[in-house]
Image: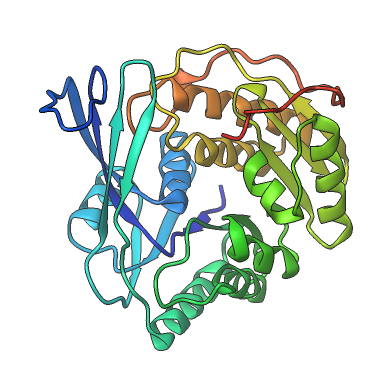
């Protein structure tokens, strides 16, 4: 089984505190607490590891506690130079699943540290099935960082997936990655107009593919997910689950899709696995990620119902 390399330019240590209800100015008592290695690419690696898929996680900094947490999860960390300490992100999760996050700014990268990250990705891409570059751009790094990482992965002959947002996503799309995984809100920002119906998402995905993106995987919260690939377009409805935390659901969706595709599944079947992984993630506490035993039953993927209303489904 070929390794999937993840790249997290702005990694974190994620601390999750479960509370009954968030009240400003009050002293709150936690009902549960957990600490996990964090960042979008790291989360993808964590899901891969839980499914027994070989992975390694590349990131600036990422030493000390973060490296220890990754190794404990069965993920070899690959650290590149960075100034400062790994950020700590705190999530307050209420009993109904409402999540309030406080994210610290993270490390700051100088030009030579950006170059070191890009060169490290190129060096590890050669034996990899996929390189996944995901998350926010750290301070000091250019908006085209993910685009540069796409090109670095290509130098190693690896396929590359991107999960980011804003100007970083626009720059990465221009580099023509093999897969992008926006949610509805991120895709709407990219194309510059709202996407209230599934038909609008389909049109936006078609435009991306026409512009050089191989596959567009769109997570849509309770409405499931959509994939537009060379083989066709499919929609898979979300599974009914009790929401405990939405943190990392999109990362689990992407990981689920890649696990299935690298195992030989069709895009439609991979979409079903992706939706099951995303649904499982929201039923777990904090930033916990799903494994095979956590997956709920999901209906097969079908042709998209273009009139489906997506208002509010941006997760």
- Give the colouring mode of the picture: rainbow
Foreground residue, 85 or 79?
A: 85
The residue drawn where x is 63% and y is 29% is 313
Foreground residue, 210 or 199?
A: 199
Image label count: 0
Task: Please indicate, yes or no, whether residue 266 appears anywhere in the rendered image.
Answer: no
Instruction: Answer with the quarter of the image where residue 284 lies.
Output: top left
Foreground residue, 18 or 79?
A: 18
Task: Please indicate, yes or no, whether residue 244 appears anywhere in the rendered image.
Answer: yes
Q: Position of residue 211 (x, y in %)?
A: 85, 62
The answer to whether 307 appears left or right of 113 in the picture is: right
Q: Is residue 266 above or below residue 141?
A: above
Q: Position of residue 252 (x, y in %)?
A: 51, 36
Q: Is residue 51 above or below residue 115?
A: above
Q: Position of residue 45 (x, y in %)?
A: 44, 47
The residue drawn where x is 69% and y is 33% is 270
The residue drawn where x is 43% and y is 86% is 111
Q: Position of residue 91 (x, y in %)?
A: 30, 37
In the picture, the quarter occupied by the C terminus is top right
The answer to whether 197 appears left or right of 31 in the picture is: right
Residue furthest toward the front? Answer: 25
Instruction: Answer with the quarter of the image where residue 154 lies.
Output: bottom right
Instruction: Answer with the quarter of the image where residue 114 lies.
Output: bottom left
The answer to whether 94 appears left or right of 54 in the picture is: left
Residue furthest toward the bottom? Answer: 112
């Amino acid at each position: 089984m070929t390794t999937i390399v993840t790249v997290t330019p702005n990694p974190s240590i994620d601390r999750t505190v479960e509370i009954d209800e968030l009240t400003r100015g009050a002293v709150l008592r936690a009902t549960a607490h957990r600490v996990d290695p964090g960042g979008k690419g790291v989360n993808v690696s964590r899901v891969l590891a839980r499914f027994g898929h070989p992975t390694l996680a590349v990131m600036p900094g990422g030493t000390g506690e973060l490296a220890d947490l990754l190794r404990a999860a069965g993920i070899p960390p690959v650290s590149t130079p960075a100034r400062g300490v790994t950020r700590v992100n705190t999530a307050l999760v209420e009993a109904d699943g409402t999540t309030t996050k406080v994210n610290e700014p993270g490390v700051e990268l100088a030009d030579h540290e950006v170059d070191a990250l890009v060169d490290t990705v190129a060096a590890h891409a050669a034996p990899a099935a996929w390189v996944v570059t995901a998350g926010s751009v750290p301070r000091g790094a250019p908006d085209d960082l993910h685009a540069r990482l796409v090109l670095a992965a290509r130098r190693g002959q690896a396929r590359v997936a991107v999960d980011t947002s804003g100007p970083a996503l626009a720059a990465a799309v221009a580099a023509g990655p093999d897969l992008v995984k926006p949610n509805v809100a991120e895709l709407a920002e990219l194309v510059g107009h709202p996407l209230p119906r599934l038909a609008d998402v389909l049109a936006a995905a078609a435009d991306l593919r026409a512009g050089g993106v191989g596959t567009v995987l769109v997570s849509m919260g309770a409405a499931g997910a959509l994939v537009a690939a060379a083989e066709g377009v499919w929609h898979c409805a979300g599974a009914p689950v009790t929401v405990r935390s939405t943190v990392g659901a999109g990362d689990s969706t992407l990981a689920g899709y890649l696990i299935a595709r690298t195992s030989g599944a069709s895009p439609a079947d991979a979409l079903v696995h992706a939706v099951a992984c995303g649904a499982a993630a929201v039923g777990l506490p904090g930033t916990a990620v799903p494994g095979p035993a956590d997956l709920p039953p999901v209906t097969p993927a079908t042709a998209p119902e273009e009139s489906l209303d997506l208002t509010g489904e941006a997760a």
